[in-house]
């Protein structure tokens, strides 16, 4: 199957500032991808490159097997919700659906209507008067109703209160399931990513720190407690905390040994790599 | 009027989307940016042209009799408000506003820049470019008391301004007042006598006694429509070039 996102040596510079450096990725189809990193780590840049709002300074990027935003057919296959869910403040909810219907040949009016009906949105309400949660939901409905094969979200839940955030992420997962689409979602909220994503990309200091299937990553990383000198053979220390060392294992953990190994969750795993990138800004990339 | 349309309809057309971030919504629908821009320019542009056309017709109807009497339709302000030229200006100002908006990415600076560029062109084109649409005709005009009486300026040494020749040609250039032998008359004793000792009302009659004339280069009145069409074509071409530039810019991914 064609990878959803494939980059090679992808680099983006704004003037003298490098926003993204030497990024090599190959993300298989059908995943919900979490893109994690601090503010300014290059998450938005990567997503803008993926939907063709920006062009790479060097390297290449292919989305669903083609150059981003190459033609109307490719535009139809990618849905994008930008940071802050931009909408036309003076247009109503119904106007936004009308706009989507006129600009997208694969528009699914029924899907859009069903989504919005559940949200209790008055179709005559102007977008400028919606709450943050309602804006995000409307933007998601517009992006989903074009029936894309890939949905991209840039910090979709960043400004939402916990309840709106929960509702939004549920809506997101339902849309992804209904469309059978892949999704990429950037966030600095690790619990959100842990909840919805099965593929993880950690981005820090403009570089990819870690990328892979969540299940696989959790199987090859663990926390070693007790004496830090006694690590399993071949283990690479990613980061140390007062609870022990987060390490990557070359294979299954050998039985016995003086160490105490605990399973990690996605949040700890991502934090370990972010922590390492911050400590070793120059060696952070492999 | 075209400048206002360019600043208030043209400049915000793309700049406001870039300012509000809505380009990130609309550029990810299944329509390429080039087509999106073409649709916006087409629809709002046609609306501007219609409005400008109606305004120009209304103005022509209202001021037509006055212009016919004065025979001054070549004067920059009158020329710019009649015939097809205002449509050319509007097309240009509108696309100029849109293009500047696309490059500045902010509405208010784009509006200001549009007004500035358009105003500069409205001043420089009539003064510098328009006289060369066709080679001017050189001719000699005898100065009757009536013609002298209507001049807007008579300098101490016979320089003149505001000569309005019967038949309504556009006087591009004129020499100072010349005596019958073709020499400047301004330094003659009788001329200075007229200047010094006539009342304003008598001056024209006093100077007319000297059989004075001026050599002028003019664009004959019959060329008026040629000039209108050349001017319209010039601005329409500029508008098309700007539209091509904007299309190129918008297809080229922006660094957002």
Image: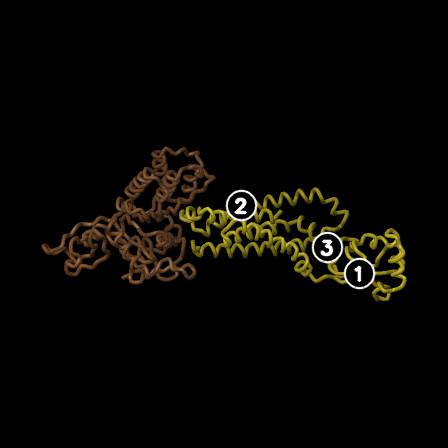
Chain colours: A brown, B yellow
Q: Between disc 3 and disc 2, whose residue precedes?
A: 2
Q: In which quarter of the image is residue B179?
A: bottom right
Q: Which of B176 and A202 is in front in this view?
A: A202
Give me the C-alpha separation between circle 3 and circle 2. Answer: 35 Å
For mark 1, give the secondary structure. loop
Please give the name of the residue rendered at 26% of the width and 44% of the height, measured from the top-left corner: A195
Residue B51 seen in this snapshot: yes
Mark seen at residue B222: 3
B182 relative position to B122: left or right: right
B223 relative position to B32: left or right: right
Between tags 3 and 2, which lies in front?
2
Please give the name of the residue rendered at 33% of the width and 61% of the height, measured from the top-left corner: A22
For mark 2, give the secondary structure. helix
> Which residue has dot 1 on it?
B159
Q: Are marks 3 and 2 in contact (CB under 8 Å)?
A: no
Dot 3 falls on which chain?
B
Give me the C-alpha separation between circle 3 and circle 1. Answer: 27 Å
Quadrant location of the C terminus of chain A in the rendered image: bottom left
For mark 3, give the secondary structure. helix
Q: Between disc 2 and disc 1, whose residue precedes?
A: 2
Tell me residue B61's x, y (percent). Answer: 69, 42
Dot 2 falls on which chain?
B
B242 relative position to B171: left or right: left
Dot 1 falls on which chain?
B
Tell me residue A244's x, y (percent). Answer: 20, 53
Would you place residue B33 above or below residue B178 in this image?
above
Tell me residue A188's x, y (percent). Answer: 32, 48
């Amino acid at each position: 199957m064609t990878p959803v996102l494939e980059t090679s040596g992808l680099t983006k510079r704004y003037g003298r500032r490098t926003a993204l450096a030497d990024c090599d990725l190959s993300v298989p189809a059908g995943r919900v991808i979490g893109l994690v990193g601090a503010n300014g780590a290059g998450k938005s840049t990567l997503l803008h490159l993926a939907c063709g709002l920006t062009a790479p300074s060097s390297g290449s990027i292919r989305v669903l097997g083609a150059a981003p935003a190459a033609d109307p057919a490719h535009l139809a296959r990618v849905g994008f919700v930008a940071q802050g869910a931009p909408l036309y403040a003076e247009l109503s909810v119904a106007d936004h659906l009308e706009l989507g219907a006129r600009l997208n040949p694969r528009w699914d009016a029924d899907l859009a209507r069903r989504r919005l009906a559940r949200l209790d949105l008055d179709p005559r309400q102007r977008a400028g008067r919606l709450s943050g949660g309602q804006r995000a939901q409307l933007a998601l409905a517009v992006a989903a109703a074009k029936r894309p094969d890939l949905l991209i979200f840039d910090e979709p839940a960043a400004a939402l209160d916990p309840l709106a955030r929960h509702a939004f992420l549920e809506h997101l997962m339902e849309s992804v399931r209904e469309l059978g689409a892949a999704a990429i979602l950037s966030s600095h909220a690790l619990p959100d990513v842990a909840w919805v994503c099965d593929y993880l990309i950690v981005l820090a200091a403009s570089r990819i720190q870690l990328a892979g299937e969540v299940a696989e990553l959790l199987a090859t990383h663990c926390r070693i407690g007790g004496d830090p000198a006694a690590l399993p053979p071949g283990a690479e220390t990613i980061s140390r905390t007062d609870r022990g060392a987060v390490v990557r294992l070359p294979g299954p953990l050998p039985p016995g040994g003086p160490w105490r190994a605990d399973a990690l969750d996605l949040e700890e795993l991502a934090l370990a790599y972010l922590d390492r990138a911050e400590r070793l800004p120059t060696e952070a990339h492999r | 009027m075209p400048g206002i349309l360019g600043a208030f309809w043209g400049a915000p057309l793309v700049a406001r989307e870039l300012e509000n971030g809505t380009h990130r919504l609309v550029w990810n629908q299944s329509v390429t940016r080039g087509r999106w821009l073409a649709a916006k320019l087409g629809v709002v542009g046609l609306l501007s042209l219609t409005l400008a056309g109606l305004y120009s017709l209304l103005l022509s109807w209202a001021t037509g009799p006055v212009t016919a009497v004065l025979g001054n339709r070549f004067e920059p302000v009158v020329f710019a408000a009649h015939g097809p030229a205002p449509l050319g200006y509007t097309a240009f100002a509108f696309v100029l506003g849109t293009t500047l908006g696309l490059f500045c990415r902010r509405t208010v600076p784009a509006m200001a820049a549009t007004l500035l560029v358009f105003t500069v062109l409205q001043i420089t084109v009539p003064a510098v470019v328009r006289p060369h649409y066709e080679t001017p005709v050189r001719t000699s005009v005898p100065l009757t008391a009536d013609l002298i009486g209507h001049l807007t300026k008579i300098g101490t040494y016979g320089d003149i301004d505001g000569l309005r020749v019967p038949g309504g040609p556009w006087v591009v250039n004129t020499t100072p007042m010349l005596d019958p032998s073709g020499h400047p008359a301004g330094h003659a004793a009788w001329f200075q006598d007229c200047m010094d000792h006539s009342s304003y009302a008598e001056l024209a009659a006093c100077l007319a006694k000297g059989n004075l004339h001026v050599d002028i280069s003019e664009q004959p009145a019959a060329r008026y429509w040629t000039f209108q069409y050349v001017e319209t074509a010039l601005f329409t071409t500029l508008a098309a070039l700007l539209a091509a530039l904007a299309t190129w810019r918008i297809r080229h991914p922006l660094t957002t």
